[in-house]
Amino acid sequence: MRIPAGHLKNIPTPFYFYDMELLSHTLSVISEATKDTPDFHVHYAIKANANPKILKAIAEAGFGADCVSGGEIKAAVAAGFPAGKIVFAGVGKNDDEIRLGLEIGISCFNVESLPELEVISQLAVHAGKTANVALRINPNVDAHTHEKITTGLNENKFGIAMEDTLTAIDRAKELPNINYTGLHFHIGSQITDLTVYRHLCQRINNLQEQLEEKEITTSSINVGGGLGIDYENPQDHPIPDFKNYFHLFRSHLQLRTGQTLHFELGRSVVAQCGSLIAKVLYVKKGHSKQFLILDAGFTELIRPAMYQAYHQIENINRPASNPSEHYDVVGPICESSDIFGKEVFLPVSERGDLIALHSAGAYGEIMSSTYNCRSLPKSYFSSDFE
Ligand code: LLP
């Protein structure tokens, strides 16, 4: 991504900077990769980044939305996503959120348990509406990713167990004001080993055969999100390999005639277009190391503290070819986990230098907090400086 360091120098830090050209390029690569398969529908997972300008750009590109709360449904509608392209997942949908979904006529509730199905039916009867329902099935596929972002294993809280699928479908068909439309899966996030998705396709193919034996018709399959990005080398891989990703489903998932296939991509759409920009407050020499103390901490970007995630760190005021040293790059929060990177090799840096933490467009700004009574970060866009 391009960062106009000169333009940013007078903006109070820390803040998020988004490269809108990269976002728009990413969106067109996705559209291009799915254009020959009109039965493929991509929903952007709002949880990755709900910045209104980002949402608007994605809605304008014709994508649907994947929401996990009433707040996300409202943000999606405000940004222009049509209700008919909104799907709603989450293990703990509350009554108000379900009512909101019914009221605006979202395309589908991704239901995660039998008790939830019963409640949606009751509320739909009360509202005089019919809820389209996909059942989220837990396929017990190991996503080979960080334990905190694995969702498709038997031990996870998500979805209905594979062996309970038929019971759940039978119940969905019995309940009033429920329209069983399909099956939903989501096995985890930051998945870089695509063979994991082949396993998912096999599970779905087997399940479909079992359902057909019982003459159950399923009109939609939703394979969730999870496609990973290259955190190590964002400059060389600013856009994930969407072509291969969609091709995998085209070749391995046996879709039936008339069936639609839905995707819920979050990180892969927005991660590379955002960076957190912070300022060096102090260069501090410790006993055996030196620290770059930034004015951003885990309140602005929690991924390193929470998932031991790597984000590439760059001093955008000094060329990488300058003499360099090792620094522990840390934030100002009063907790020892407030570290962005250890022993990071950076050009010799000084108070006031701008530091970019790259690949932070997904699960960055949206996960920021006011801990320590700090302010939430602002955001700026490449289009502001044109
Ligand atoms: N669909 C469902 C049902 C999900 O739970 C998620 C993400 C997605 C789609 C989008 O997944 P993506 O394409 O972005 O991988 N905060 C963590 C990631 C949590 C992901 C939660 N679910 C992180 O910073 O790595």
Image (cartoon, grey):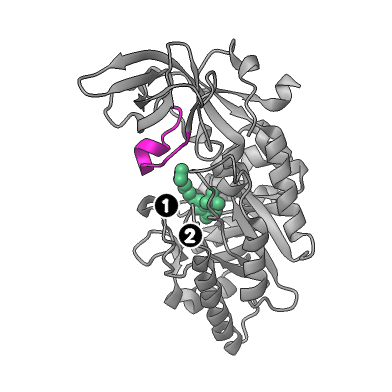
Label 2: element kind: helix
From the image, tell me which residue sits under label 1: 149
Mark 1–mark 2 contact, CB under 8 Å? no
Please, which residue is most extreme toward the bottom here? 213
**Which quarter shows the C terminus?**
top right
Give the left or right position of residue 175, taking residue 302 as reference: right
Quadrant hosting residue 292: top left
Q: Is residue 343 magenta?
A: no
Is 126 drawn above or below residue 283 in the view shown?
below
The residue depicted at 52 percent of the width and 23 percent of the height is 377
Residue 22: horizontal and vertical position, in percent? 68, 38
Query: Could you say which is closer to the camera, residue 45 or residue 283?
Result: 283
Dot 2 alpha-carbon crowd within 10 angstroms: few under 14, some 14 to 19, many 20 or more = some
Please indicate, yes or no, whether residue 197 appears anywhere in the rendered image: yes
Is 311 drawn above or below residue 320 in the view shown?
below
Label 1: element kind: helix
Label 1 CB less than 8 angstroms from ligand 1: yes
Please indicate, yes or no, whether residue 70 appears anywhere in the rendered image: no
Residue 50: horizontal and vertical position, in percent? 59, 37
The residue depicted at 35 percent of the width and 36 percent of the height is 305
From the image, tell me which residue sits under label 2: 116
Is 143 drawn above or below residue 383 in the view shown?
below
Give the extent of the magenta segment: 298-312
Magenta region, mostly helix, strand or loop? loop
Residue type beneath disc 2: Glu
Dot 1 alpha-carbon crowd within 10 angstroms: few under 14, some 14 to 19, many 20 or more = some
Spatial CA distance of label 1 from label 2 is: 23 Å
Q: Which mark is residue 70?
A: none
Residue type beneath disc 1: Ile
Residue 352: horizontal and vertical position, in percent? 47, 11
Label 2 CB less than 8 angstroms from ligand 1: no
Give the left or right position of residue 150, taking residue 131 as reference: left
